[in-house]
Amino acid sequence: MTQAVDVKQEAAAILDRLGVERDAWTGGEMASSSPVTGEEIARLKVTSDTSAAIEAAHAAFLEWRLVPAPRRGELVRLLGEELRAAKADLGRLVSLEAGKITSEGLGEVQEMIDICDFAVGLSRQLYGLTIATERPGHRMMETWHPLGVVGIISAFNFPVAVWSWNAALALVCGNSIVWKPSEKTPLTALASQAILERAIARFGEAPKGLSTLLIGDRAVGEALVDHPKVALVSATGSTRMGREVGPRLAKRFARAILELGGNNGGIVCPSADLDMTLRAVAFGAMGTAGQRCTTLRRLFVHVDVYDQLVPRLKKAYESVSVGNPLETSALVGPLIDKAAFDGMQKALEAARAAGGVVTGGERVREAGKDEAFYVRPALVEMPEQAGPVLEETFAPILYVMRYSDFDEALRLHNAVAAGLSSSIFTLNMQEAERFLAADGSDCGIANVNIGTSGAEIGGAFGGEKETGGGRESGSDAWKAYMRRATNTVNYSKALPLAQGVSFDID
Ligand code: NAD
């Protein structure tokens, strides 16, 4: 591993190019470090008056909701254009601040562009229904209206894409947005906000306060969650966070989209195409250094193919290039910080104590970079699904287990608290369909012959059980960002009541 670039200098140059004021990221009280080297790269000012920002967002909402939706789509179209122009810089900043390998940093920005395109089309398709009514001379319909201020809380591992999923939809739906990014990745948030502000300037007539950034840790997030003028909070992060945020929102009857932790599983059946499975498992489990909510963490392999697949997988674990994510040769970049490394080592110890046999998992050091935490991904052969296998450890650990009975594999697959993503590898149609059926995978995402990670924006994204039940991004996820009204219009000269009720007062 070599350290060819000055991470701090490069981040500064990108922020300058993207038009982020130096004042926003120098001289403040909140340090931001790069996992690439472990060094501090910025000091940000924490937002002190969250309430003023939210009040301004509410005032902006009152105006923005009256702008026709296709016109609102024009702003998002401009955001997509600005993102295209800034893709190389923003992608690089994602790599510098979150440690993603270059292609994944750029891929994250591509996802932002894709959701903008989706939202532009959506801005002309916010359809309601007309519904048959039992009363003559009446018409019943559903209309969709803007909701209010949308709060967005995001995690470090998708520092900008998650914001864009929410922001693009919320804006075309007529809402204003207030974003509290992860305290581990605030620079990419400053950059994204600057890019949106450029789009707003070109758009010309957007109300002030339409999009605001709140910089800070969970206390700032709590202020956003508790503010009575925030109609919906879309919160992405750990299940621990969701346990705190969910009840707070429920207490004031605010809407919640909770996108929380995953403990994603895969089943490899006897008929699986093992070459394809190997590649899908390798990317799903080791990609993004195991720091995706959809990372593959548990693999059930049929006894008939176990000895063909698992030795090949182990070889991939032993040889995958771990290192500087800014160099194209690396496939696995650093963990976000020391706490992530410690959490991984603790889980591996627990796995060993439970009879697991570990390949990899050791720290990969580089002289002079003691604060950066690179690690070789770990494959752990487990005698059974127990101990640390039941929980999400946000690091590259893949637990592999044998199975011989399909129903038992499916039962074990579903026997964890989280329910985000899942995969089956099979060429047997009955197994594939069963996995997708009502008594199959209990996750929000269920795939056949592709891995658990790398979802496209066109589908609704989210998971069940302790993953929180939220849906965002594509399909009809937009409905969560709008207020639905059922309207009944009487164009007759009588007043028939529903259900045959009579109430004549002559
Ligand atoms: P985290 O829970 O530590 O933090 C996420 C965000 O929540 C941060 O912005 C943080 O400041 C904020 N926060 C924490 N406690 C809060 C509180 N009480 N009130 C308000 N805000 C609070 O998560 P992380 O370490 O940044 O990210 C990793 C986790 O996120 C993993 O569990 C991963 O699976 C999950 N994740 C889920 C999805 C998904 O779509 N389901 C996507 C990405 C990450």
Image (cartoon, rainbow, N blue to C red):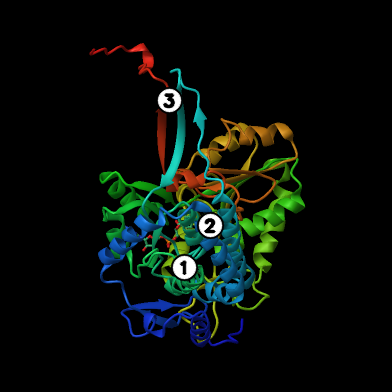
- Of residue 474 and residue 237, the one placed in the foreground of this image is 474
User: Whole-percent x and y of residue 333?
Assistant: 57, 71
Residue 226 bears which disc, if any? Answer: none
Task: Answer left or right for 141 relative to 317.
Answer: left
User: Whole-percent x and y of residue 386?
Assistant: 48, 46
The residue at 71%/54% (across/down) is: 278
The residue at 41%/68% (across/down) is: 339
- Please, what is the three-letter code of the amino acid marked with disc 1? Phe
Q: Which residue is mark 2?
A: 73
- Of residue 332 and residue 217, the one placed in the foreground of this image is 217
* Quadrant holding the C terminus: top left
The residue at 53%/72% (across/down) is: 94
- In this view, the mark in front (3 or 1): 3
Instruction: Classify mark 1 as within 8 Å of ligand 1 or not, answering yes or no.
Output: no
Residue 341 bears which disc, if any? Answer: 1
Q: Secondary structure at mark 2?
A: helix
- Please, what is the three-letter code of the amino acid marked with disc 2? Gly
- Of residue 276 and residue 304, the one placed in the foreground of this image is 276
N-term mark: 3 or 1: 1
Please report contact status of discs 2 and 3: CB closer than 8 Å, yes or no.
Answer: no
The Cα atoms of the two marked residues, 2 and 3, are separated by 34 Å
Q: Would you call the spot at circle 1 few (<14 residues within 10 Å), some (14-19), or many (20 or more)?
A: many
Task: Answer left or right for 184 relative to 76.
Answer: left
| 142 over 347 or under it: above or below | above
Q: Secondary structure at mark 3?
A: loop
Q: Secondary structure at mark 1?
A: helix
- In this view, the mark in front (2 or 3): 3
Q: Which residue is mark 3?
A: 491
